[in-house]
Image (tube, rainbow, N blue to C red):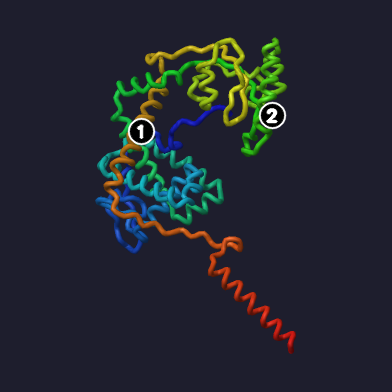
Amino acid sequence: MLRTNYWRRATLLALAAVLVVVLAAGCGKKKEEGAAPGTGEGKTIATYKDGTVTDTEFKKYSTFFGIVQPQTEMYLSIPQLQEQFLREYIGYKVLYKQLGDQKLDDAAQKEVDTFYSQMKQAIDETPDVKKKAEEAKLTEANIRYFYTMISSIMKDQEKKITDDQVKKEFESTKADYNVVSVRHILIGTVDPQTGEEKRKDDEALKLAKEVKGKLDAGGDWKALAKQYSEDEGSKENGGLYENQQAKGWVQEFKDAANKQEIGKVGEPVKSQFGYHVMKVEKREPTPFDKLSDQDKALIKQGLASTNLNKFMTDELPKLITKIDLPKTETPATDDTKTDDSKTNDSKADNNKAETEKKEEAK
């Protein structure tokens, strides 16, 4: 529960080259080769240099991304984030066009096939997801196109990163690659499943200090972890995380693992989970030439992401000429009616009362 997720747009960033797709539009018309799914269908909601985005096209892309990353649907309910998401999509379209037509080799084709199979399984096994895909008319060709567009752009960005840049980035974050063995006992403040408060902050701190006192007095880590710790991942193992890279832990825990005196029980460390009573048993630095290929690949991906974000922030706005997303309106409730509606309700009540008085007079 203490691990973090590295930057990676789910499996969208797997290795793949550009997939050239010929898609047929409705009404008997034919799209240009390689056009994005939904191009020319529906209302235009964005215009940029050399292209447009329609509402049909954007719905297909949003649905695709929402299946891969379910939290996207929540973000898109916020107008500002929906516009930001649309701008990002335009950025992908611009960069994808710059790549030109390329052929998939056998390995890249296998990547696309595997991704599609996994996504199709997720759609078929989840009724709500299947309904959304059907409503957006999201086809196999659409899924393959969007996947390849994003993954090939990221692969192209990664190719531009040099070994020297990777090494320089490592030097600035090398503490993340320390291999650490640490014991801890977590006194939680929130339920990790629901996020609801489990105990007050001061109560958790008091209990954590009590645990630290017992450890300082020679208490047994295994017994105390089993009795007190609320980290299900380590409580049955004496609170031990052994020979792990520091970068995978949440920030506060990582900092303590990297800085706390070895062999000594430190003061309780607060994180989003609660308070950790920690003892670092071992900490070894990892030199650059000992990094795994996966570590180097992740550094390269992070640098590529930074460059992509720079394009989206600095260059893309100059290319977009118009955004015309539909305005979303929040229906008025009984407690949030407009002044006019409240006035009309008041008039209706007065008229009703007046009518009742007349009836009584009769």
Q: Mark 1 Cα within 10 Å, few/some/many (few <14, many 20+)?
A: few
Q: CA distance from mark 1 to mark 2?
A: 41 Å
Secondary element at tag 1: helix
Residue 212: horizontal and vertical position, in percent? 66, 17
The circle drawn on residue 306 is 1
**Left/right of residue 145 with respect to residue 119 in the rendered view:** left
Quadrant including the N terminus: top right
Q: Residue at x 68, y 33 (%)?
A: 199
* Image quadrant where residue 322 sits: bottom left
**Left/right of residue 259 with respect to residue 274 in the rendered view:** left
* Image quadrant where residue 263 sits: top right
* Image quadrant where residue 185 sits: top right
Residue 52: horizontal and vertical position, in percent? 30, 54
Task: Tell me, yes or no, if residue 139 can be seen here.
Answer: no
Which residue type carries mark 2? Glu
Q: Residue at x 65, y 35 (%)?
A: 191
The residue tagged 2 is 203
Residue 266: horizontal and vertical position, in percent? 60, 16
Which residue type carries mark 1? Thr
Q: Residue at x 60, y 11 (%)?
A: 264
Task: Tell me, yes or no, if residue 52 can be seen here.
Answer: yes
Quadrant including the C terminus: bottom right
Q: Note whether 220 is above or below 306 in the view shown.
A: above
**Left/right of residue 1 with respect to residue 142 in the rendered view:** right
Q: Earlier in the sequence, mark 1 or mark 2?
A: 2
Q: Are marks 1 and 2 in contact (CB under 8 Å)?
A: no
